[in-house]
Image (cartoon, grey):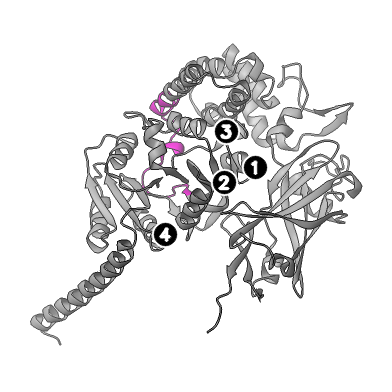
Amino acid sequence: MPSVKSNSVHSIAIEFAHDQCVKKRDAHHEQRDSKNQNVEVSVIIPIYNTEVYLADCLDSVASNIEEICAEALLIDDGSTDRSSIIAQQYAYNDRRFKYYRTENNGLGAARNYGVSRARGEYLFFVDSDDLLLEGTLSNMLKAAKFSNADVAVCDVARFQSEKTMGSALHISALTPLANNVTTIHESPWLVNNVGSWGKLIKHSYYKSAQLSFLEGTLYEDVVTVFAMHYQASRISIIRTCGYLWRVRSKGPKSITQNMADRTNLEDRVATLRLLLSYLDDYEVEEEIREQLAIRIARFDLIGYINLLPTMEDGEALAFLDLIGPIAEEAIGQNALLHVPMKFQQLLEDIRKRDLNHIRQVVSYIATDYSSAKVWREGCEYKIAVPDDLFTIPTRNYKNDYDVIIPMGYIEKISIYGLRVVIKGCVRASRISMPHPTKQLYRGFLVNDITGKKVPLDCVSCKREGITKSRRLAHSHKNYQTDNYNYEGCGFRLTIDFSALDEIDNMVGNNCIVLEYRNPIYSGVRTIRGVSAAARMSVRSFSITMKRYRGIIAFDARNTPIVQLQNVRKQN
């Protein structure tokens, strides 16, 4: 049996070896940083009682800042669990991590403190329970510098344990964008790109725009993030998913998971009023106001409204007294005309303070609204809903379709030498499209960094059997009597790698973007969603050409990505 002394010697040896590794790594970082004295990115991570998730978060940040000259500022907002110890360990072991402890003043104060300490050319905020996907910061930095953008934003997915899903807000914000560089004035649906995280912000722009976070409130970033978008002259869009927004299953609930708390609603209402004041002060144009009104109805308030059936009458009426006035202020009569029908009914009931009717409508929306029969009548689409529940006069379903982006899905990928053929469809739930001649496509491969857009051979085609295979998720529940036919929604797209080999500015991630048009709706979307069989068919696909080496990969949102790397010349 080893003696205590030998154990001590062994421990000292391990500690010495560890210190030597740390010194070698730090020397490597110093040598790399000496080539560029300026810190490129300051990653600001407010921390409060997230011991369960913190190490995973910091590991994901560490892997991202390997490729760039960056610092990670750990702002401990008075944690009372082991978060402080974990954060200090990272700062002790890695010179790129810097630890600061403050009194518990909330997220806004922690972020502001982090900005005051930041030396980076760009700022990037991370919540301490979330994750950065590998290569995110490097790709965003390249895109921001290439386009000289004030802000660069990446796609975001929600995740819980092993399950990853799209964020409805960010789908609404980023999926319809046709170009890689835009502004909120050109693309007003960017109002849905909420959260301070997932955004690379030029530090000089942050200062010149006089941005800062509200302090002493739960929704500290609502006004700041809107102002950030509104004042930016160039916003770079990275279509691939780079940020995972956690749904907590352990530890304290996050702010967005704790809506039953009255203080949560009070803070939401207060920050929305500040946002409305900002709209008036800056004379924000009507189209952006309309998109914001739709967001407030669909996302900001609906979470609280959905809780009303679970509350006692007194608590529910107290919530209504808070929701009613802000709903009327934020969603005026003009904006109300653009809000989906189900929200129009709820807003009418809120105005009347009819709690029992609200509960019935919420229950119906949760169980039956998405499967109610929809049909075309003249130039309008109508929906069959119970008259005793939907007392508003309209049955026009157009607004619902305007805010719901049609689903794009890839079912099959085939490889023919240097050509890859992709088959899939784009369809809107409960809108029949039986003939492929009615839905036309244009396909492009778009580079995340340069925005280079390469036309692809893309044609409409019939996808026989798709209606039957998808009916449970996308058709009326009485499928046998109320058929919807989606077989004309198919597309066939070809990527010719020999042609790509002749094109500049394609290194890195390239996404497939489709423009679609039919007599009922039209739009643009990045294709996400690939069948398991299609993913397997290209699992080992790799091709080396004269100029590029290419593979097909998939991100956390199941987005197919054509990755191209320069082929290095052999000596």
Q: Which residues are magenta?
A: 245-268
Read off the residue under disc 3. Answer: 184
Label 1 amino acid?
A: Leu
Q: Residues within 10 Å of mark 2 (few under 14, many from 20)?
A: many
> Is the N terminus in the top left, top right, bottom left or bottom right quadrant?
bottom left
Mark 1 to mark 3 CA distance (whole Å): 11 Å
Read off the residue under disc 2. Answer: 237
Mark 4 to mark 2 CA distance (whole Å): 19 Å
Residue found at the far left of this picture: 5
Of pointers 2 and 3, the one earlier in the residue sequence: 3
Instruction: Indicate the secondary structure of the residue bearing disc 4.
Output: helix
Q: Residue at x 57, y 42 (%)?
A: 170
Label 4 amino acid?
A: Asn
Mark 1 to mark 4 CA distance (whole Å): 26 Å
Q: Nearer the viewer, residue 367 or 401?
A: 401
Of pointers 1 and 4, the one earlier in the residue sequence: 4
Mark 3 to mark 4 CA distance (whole Å): 28 Å
Of pointers 1 and 2, the one earlier in the residue sequence: 1
Mark 1 to mark 2 CA distance (whole Å): 8 Å
Label 2 amino acid?
A: Ile
Coordinates of residue 382 in the picture (x, y in percent): 81, 27
Read off the residue under disc 1. Answer: 177
Marks 1/2 in contact by CB < 8 Å: the verdict is yes
Coordinates of residue 462 in the picture (x, y in percent): 88, 54
Q: Is residue 210 left or right of residue 93?
A: right
Of pointers 4 and 2, the one earlier in the residue sequence: 4
In reply to whether residue 241 is colored magenta, the answer given is no
Read off the residue under disc 4. Answer: 64
Q: Nearer the viewer, mark 4 or mark 2?
A: 2
